[in-house]
Amino acid sequence: MLNVALPKGRLGEKVYAMFEKAGFPCPSIRENNRKLIFENPDCGVRYFWVKPSDVAIYVERGAADIGVAGKDILLEYAPDVYELFDLKTGVCRMAVAAPEGFRDDTRRALKVATKFTNIARAHYAARGRDIDIIHLNGSIEIAPILGLSDVIVDIVETGTTLKENHLEVVETVVPISARLIANKASFKFKNEPIEAIVKSLASQTEETV
């Protein structure tokens, strides 16, 4: 049985449709219920829904053979997994945003609010910029408005929330999209079904380009 960790939400539903098209369906997953685990013994596959930020943990620890995680999670937590494929869905970017008209005063440490502390540190370290990291878990946009931080580092999709709060993107840190990842041992011992999925997903992404 191939164990597949899918992120809860719209992204997971979209990705499941790709797996279904790849020949690994599990009809019960589309039923209106609160189940978290779904099996199709005929196809040798078991899916389960988990919090997006937890997918990489399930895969790294071997509870899942493969899973789908955002590039932001892989960069932030650096799990010991194989990154197999860019699914080219869930596309957005990690960016630095600041109040409109912001100018960086390089004479002092830049106050950066973010929940992606490792990504932010690496980004500014590469520029030799001294920063003061302020770790937040939510409502990051209000940090510069209230003077808690100078800038924020966060995921940006449409930018609407930023505009509504008079913030603007001043720099793109890295493009983000959903990636297919694999447990290292599983990739060795369940290589055939994993490679079959990768091949089909690759052809599907080529169709949409």
Image (spheres, grey):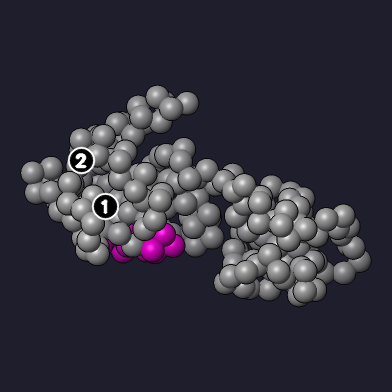
Q: Quadrant of residue 126?
A: bottom right
Is 62 magenta? The answer is yes
Mark 1, Cα crowd under 10 Å, few <14 / some 14-19 / many 20+, is: many
Residue positioned 25% across, 46% down in the render: 188
- Name the kind of residue labelled 2 in the image: Phe
- Residue 83 in sight in this render: no
Instruction: Write down the residue under mark 1.
Output: 4
Residue 36 colored in magenta in the image: no
Q: Where is residue 130 in the image (x, y as percent from the top left)?
A: 79, 65
Is residue 90 visible to us here? yes
Indicate the position of residue 39 as horizontal and vertical percent values: 15, 53
Residue 24 is marked as 2
Q: Is the magenta stretch mostly helix, strand or loop?
A: helix
Check disc 1 and give the amino acid type: Val
Q: Nearer the viewer, residue 33 or 20?
A: 33
Residue 77, relative to residue 197: is it above or below? Answer: below
Spatial CA span between label 2 and label 1: 11 Å
Mark linked to residue 108:
none
Q: Is 74 in front, or is 207?
A: 207
On the image, the x and y values in percent for residue 85 come to 40, 39
- Which is nearer the eye, 124 or 6? 6
What's the residue at 88%, 62% (across, down)?
A: 106
Task: Report helix, strand or loop for mark 2.
Answer: loop
Q: Do the residues labelled 2 and 1 touch (CB within 8 Å)?
A: yes
Query: What residue is at 45 percent from the left and 46 percent from the top?
Result: 178
Magenta part of the chain: 51-65
Q: Residue 165 vs residue 62: left or right?
A: right
Q: Is residue 13 left or right of residue 172?
A: left
